[in-house]
Image (tube, rainbow, N blue to C red):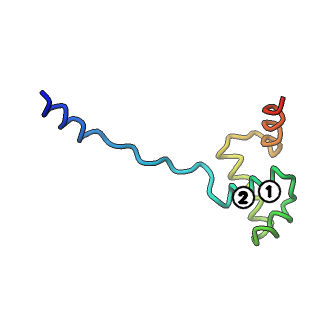
Amino acid sequence: MINDALTMCTRVAIPQAAAPLLTRQEEKVLTLWMDGASNQKIASHLSINGKTVYTYKRNIRMKLHMDTRFSPFLSLQESEN
């Protein structure tokens, strides 16, 4: 009986650490975005192209299921009230 339980335990998959939702670069973009930086300022700060910033923002919105580009700011206001 104990052997059966031990055998069963070894068959159970141990969950791997979940991958982060956003990449490090997306987190940096989101932080600067939330601070009110323009795409050009974000691009300059991170040494990337302005179009790349736009792409990162789009990916962030998709991953976080945001409806509009103002969603991060709206959720911030709701949490402050």
Q: Position of residue 39 (x, y in %)?
A: 84, 61
Left or right of residue 59, residue 51 in this image: right
Mark 2, secondary structure of its residue: helix
Can you name the residue that lies furthest to the front here? 2
Residue shown at 19% from the left, 36% from the top: 6
The residue nearer to you, when weighing 29 against 3, is 3
Name the secondary structure under disc 1: helix
Decide: few, some or many residues near mark 1? Use Cα within 10 Å; few <14, some 14-19, many ≥20: some
Measured along the vertical axis of the image, is residue 62 above or below residue 81? below
For the point 82% across and 41% down, the residue is 73
Residue type indicated by callout 1: Leu
Q: Quadrant of the N terminus?
A: top left
Q: How many marks?
A: 2
Q: Position of residue 71 (x, y in %)?
A: 79, 40
Name the residue carrying label 1: 32
Name which quarter of the figure residue 70 lies in.
Answer: top right
**In this rendering, is residue 39 above or below 14?**
below
Marking on residue 67: none
Do the residues bearing badges 2 and 1 touch, measured as CB atoms within 8 Å? yes
Occupied quadrant, residue 74: top right
- Residue 78 versus residue 55: which sits nearer the camera? 78
Report x, y in % for residue 26.
68, 57
Circle 2 is placed at which residue position?
A: 28
Q: Looking at numbered disc 2 in the image, what kind of residue is underneath it?
A: Lys
Please name whichever residue, 16 or 40, is drawn nearer the observer in this view of the structure. 16
Q: What residue appears at the point 75 percent right and 68 percent down from the top-left corner?
A: 46
- Residue at x 69%, y 50% (from the top left corner): 60
Packing grade of label 2 (10 A; few <14, some 14-19, many >=20) is: some
> In whole angstroms, how far apart are the C-alphas of marks 2 and 1?
6 Å
Quadrant of image for the C terminus: top right
